[in-house]
Amino acid sequence: MPVRKAEAVWQGSLQEGGGTVKIGSGLFEAPYTFKARVEEEDQKTNPEELLGAAHASCYAMFLSASLGRAGHTVNRISATASVTLIRGEAGLQISEIALDVEGDVPGISAETFQEFAEKAKTGCPVSQALASVPSITLSARLA
């Protein structure tokens, strides 16, 4: 299995500086700042947004694979990961990741879809890597 890489370069102080993050495939490069992390800042990203993208994409792939292995045809899985950052006693902390997923899976019951969705919440590799986050919640529904 290949080793995946991402690179981040930061210049300047935390409050006034900024950086660029890019992924190894070269398909994505974006500026990031501390302000974009703790406030709204247009056209800049932050670690939590990137973590959310990684979590949502991993979760959607894992759920699709699990459903497919069980014989269900998946037309579409749409997943969003909302990452909450707080100022705790130890500084900035991720306190919650809320996964919201909608699936277009013909012939499956809502109950069965929910069971697969719950298993994917703890089964996808990024979820496993984020196991120390105090709360990872899930909202799952069929289209």
Image (cartoon, rainbow, N blue to C red):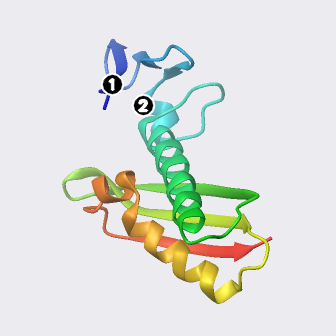
Residue 14, disc: 1
Give the residue displayed 55% in from the left and 52% down from the top: 61
- Toward which corner of the image does residue 40 lie, by quadrant? top right
The local crowd at label 1, few if under 14, some if 14 to 19, many if 20 or more residues have their Cα within 10 Å, is: few
Image height check: is 43 above or below 71? above
**Mark identifier at residue 34:** 2
- Quadrant of the image containing the N terminus: top left
Indicate the position of residue 23 as horizontal and vertical percent values.
45, 21
Identified by mark 2, the residue type is Phe
Which dot marks residue 25?
none
Q: Residue 135, relative to residue 52: is it above or below?
A: below
Q: Quarter of the image for the C terminus: give it.
A: bottom right
Q: State the residue at coordinates (57%, 26%).
A: 44
Provide residue 100's location: percent of width, then percent of height: 61, 65
Q: Mark 2: which secondary structure?
A: helix
Q: Residue furthest bottom?
A: 111
Tell me which residue sits at (55%, 47%) in the image: 57
Residue furthest left in the image: 90
Q: Is residue 54 left or right of residue 88?
A: right
Q: Position of residue 33 (x, y in %)?
A: 46, 26
Q: Earlier in the sequence, mark 1 or mark 2?
A: 1
**Which image quarter: residue 117?**
bottom right
Foreground of the two, 100 or 1? 1
Q: Residue 17 vs residue 92: left or right?
A: right
Residues at circles 1 and 2 in contact by the CB criterion of under 8 Å = yes
**What residue is drawn where x is 74% and y is 74%?**
142
Amino acid type of the residue that numbered disc 1 sits on in the rendered structure: Leu
Per the model, the C-alpha gap separating discs 1 and 2 is 6 Å
Count of numbered tags: 2
Assign a secondary structure to mark 1: loop
Looking at the picture, how far across and down is residue 94, in whole percent? Answer: 35, 55
